Image (cartoon, rainbow, N blue to C red):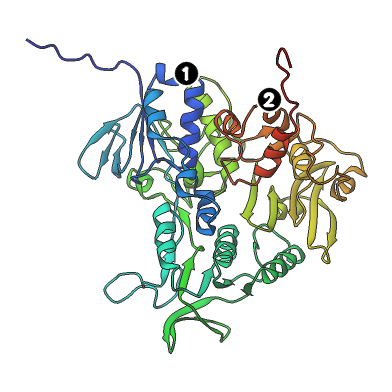
Amino acid sequence: MTSRPLPDPRPRLVVVGSGMAATRLVEELVARGAPDRMAITVLGDEPVAPYNRILLSAVLEGTHRPEALTLRHPRWYADHGVDLRLGARVLGIDRERRDVMLVDGTLVEYDRLVLATGSIPSLPPIRGLVRVDGSLHEAVHAFRSLADCERLLRALPGSRRAVVVGGGLLGLQVARALGTRGLATEVVEGADHLLHQQLSAPAARILARDLKRLGVAVYTGARAVRLVEGAGGPALRLDNGFTLDTDLVVLTAGGRPSTALARGAGLAVRRGIVVDDRLASVTDPAVHALGDCAEHGGRTTGFVPPAWEQASVLAGLLCGDTPTYDGARVVARLRATDLDVAVLGDAAAELAAGGEVVEVANPVAGSHRRLVVRDGRIVAATLVGDLSRVGLITQHFDRRTVLGPHEPGALLLPERAPGVGKAPALPDDAEVCACAGVTAGRIRACSSLEQVRDTTRATTGCGGCASTVRQLLSSRPALVTKGS
């Protein structure tokens, strides 16, 4: 007689999603030794290993290979006792039975459930995008996944013109990537200026001028209304009367939190899955949400740094600690060659709360630097064209440092930096990687870029810190061995 294996006595944690937020959560759990105390299962909808979505535009641009985007290989999960299931699409959640059902009928039971379902593209109201049979026009491309990126790459040969719908961070990254591929690229943005949720109009004008210099035309205050067949192929008609001939239409506007599973399970959903300060659903404390799909304090973010901060907080909670998430840290970077933009906090909200503006602009040099200061503290910042002080500004922003009356202005003046090629004069406690919250001292303690990536996750988010990380590593003193 054969004996049956005893059931696993560990509590069961199921993570739905294998994106950047979910991967960071698992990394934090592994670092805390959680797999020894709980059975962790990760259900990834896509058939490929977890990867960095922020750097998809770098693959499109040709500066990164697709395999370079992998965050953790499946072997890493297995080596750390985590059950990673790829191509595992969840059909529904039964909160009474505490299980999730996959599309193939498999049931996965849980004691705690984490929803990290991210965001999904939604089609803008442009007639002609979808054919009569329900298929997408062959010239139209979404840009949310590696599969989307690979499909767009396959369409580049023979294409000469492209229109990007959406002038947000993703849209500008895609437009710049297509421009470097040699396509005549145009951006259509319905708001009156680019990055309207992050930048002021003067800063956006500098950014638009930089794009024009790089060969990307910009149409603001205009909306695409219809895709038509012109004499030379597809053409996108705008509501201002312009018609843009094009070979490719890339949709980067209209993304929204993926909440269908949560709605189907009866969880509270507004724009995102509503969570409290413990990142638990306000409907069911056994269900958590983080990343793009979560709504905390009436806000969804869509950026990597807050998602990674949520992952760290939630990992601590799942391991018995008592941290809470306050939703205060909003940091965004534009990751595109020859375009430098950094955004900290919510400038509009802070101005409405009585913040004051400290601003230095040099349109001739293509730079615009703006701080919002309240009670002596930097509560928001936007930097365009010159990010030499972004590390120090982020440090003060995070620590809520009380500054003297002249210090905010001094932070915006050009850096009195060492000569080109020398490492930035950053103190060890200055933040270098905004996505992962990594300081210069932690970078200097590493011996290689591979060690930096593996132990701190710096450079694996938006990639904006890569050059500073390399400079800090190259400035480390060489080790002196015996006999030398």
Q: Is residue 307 left or right of residue 353?
A: left
Relative horizontal placement of residue 423, taking residue 38 as reference (left or right): right
Residue 37 seen: no
Q: What label does residue 33 carry, if any?
A: 1
Q: Secondary structure at mark 2?
A: loop
150 and 479: which is toward the camera: 479
- Residue drawn at (58%, 35%), measured in percent from left and top? 309
- Nearer the observer: mark 2 or 1; the answer is 2
Which residue lies at the image location 50% right of the left edge and 45% below the top edge? 52
Q: Position of residue 184 (x, y in %)?
A: 56, 74
At mark 1, the secondary structure is loop
Identify the residue position indicated by label 2 in the image. 445
Q: Residue furthest right?
A: 406
394, above or below 475, in the image: below
Give the residue type that dot 2 points to.
Ala
Which amino acid type is marked by label 1? Gly
Other residues around mark 2 within 10 Å, as few (<14) / some (14–19) / many (≥20): some
Most distant residue in the front direction: 483
**Residue at (56% x, 40% y) in the render:** 460
* Residue 284 image point, x, y percent: 41, 34
Label disc, if present, on residue 165 of the rendered structure: none
* Residue 322, quarter of picture: top right
Residue furthest out toward the bottom:
231
Q: Quadrant of the C terminus?
A: top right
Q: Considering depth in this image, is 186 or 271 the residue closer to the camera?
A: 186
175 relative to 47, above or below: below
Q: Residue 289 location in percent, x, y?
A: 46, 39
Reading the chain from its start, which is encountered first: label 2 or label 1? Answer: 1
